[in-house]
């Protein structure tokens, strides 16, 4: 079974990512499945009833289309087609801040270990690291930076405000 990083731990990943051929009607496997947004929109009622279906959204798709289901989705994944495509960061941030999504938010696709800290800062809490990279090395990279200076999803305040409020006693030099 493949592994992912979920909330700072390496865990087995039971979710299958469904990537149907263009124009083909997807056949849904048994067990936890992540379907593309188009499949979700076509079969949302049946998929919500399953209880073990999530959705993945491509970097060019609008996360607002998921608004009606966000409180019932156990998992939303954002596909990074290339590590240089930064649109997924914006999608993750929008899902957390504007649309209030509180379930698992996973980065899939061409996800490299050195992206994980930035992904976490915009709201991702799960990462399917590219298969040719060591997932345990990637996990270690999540602890490389002790304090970010800028505000983000996590932490919501910039460093100078965290120091002023006593949330951080000293910033790294």
Image (spheres, grey):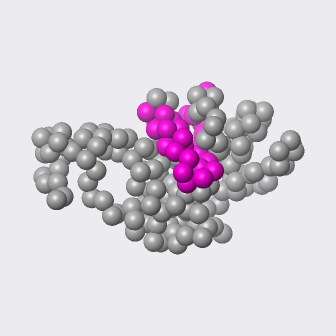
* Residue drawn where x is 24% and y is 41% of the image: 158
On-image quarter of the N terminus:
bottom right
Height in image: 74 above or below 129?
A: above
Give the answer, above or below, for where 96 lies relative to 111.
Answer: above
Does the magenta run of residues contain 159?
no
Judge whether 130 appears above or below 74 on screen.
below
Residue 149 lies left or right of residue 33; in this view the side is left
Q: Is residue 92 visible?
A: no
User: Which residue sits at x=46%, y=66%?
Assistant: 138
* Start-end of magenta stretch: 68-97
Q: Which residue reaches farthest front?
A: 84
Rendering coords of residue 57 (x, y %): 64, 41
Which of these two is toward me, 125 or 78?
78
Count of all numbered marks drawn on residues in the image:
0
Q: Which residue is pictured at 55% across the width and 54% down the height?
A: 83
In the rendered image, residue 70 lying in the magenta stretch gets the answer yes
Q: Is residue 145 visible?
A: yes
| Residue 19 in the image, given as x and y percentages of width and height | 75, 51
- Give residue 40's position: percent from left, percent from top: 72, 37
Q: Nearer the viewer, residue 43 or 108?
A: 108
168 left or right, relative to 108:
left
Q: Quadrant of residue 166?
A: top left
Q: Is residue 95 left or right of residue 154?
A: right
Question: Which residue is more in the foreground, 52 or 90?
Answer: 90
């Amino acid at each position: 079974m493949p592994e992912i990083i979920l909330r700072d731990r390496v865990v087995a990943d039971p979710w299958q990512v469904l990537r149907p051929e263009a124009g083909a009607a997807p056949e849904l496997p048994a067990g936890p499945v992540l379907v593309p947004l188009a499949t979700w929109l076509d079969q949302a009622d049946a998929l919500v009833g399953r209880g073990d279906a999530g959705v993945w959204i491509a970097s060019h798709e609008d996360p607002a289309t998921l608004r009606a289901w966000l409180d019932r989705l156990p998992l939303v994944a954002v596909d990074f087609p290339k590590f240089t495509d930064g649109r997924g960061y914006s999608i993750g941030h929008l899902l957390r801040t504007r649309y209030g999504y509180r379930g698992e938010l996973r980065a899939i696709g061409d996800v490299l270990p050195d992206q994980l800290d930035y992904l976490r800062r915009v709201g991702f809490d799960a990462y399917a690291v590219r298969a040719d990279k060591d997932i345990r090395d990637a996990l270690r990279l999540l602890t490389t930076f002790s304090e970010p200076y800028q505000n983000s999803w996590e932490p919501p305040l910039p460093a100078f405000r965290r120091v002023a409020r006593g949330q951080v006693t000293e910033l790294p030099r």
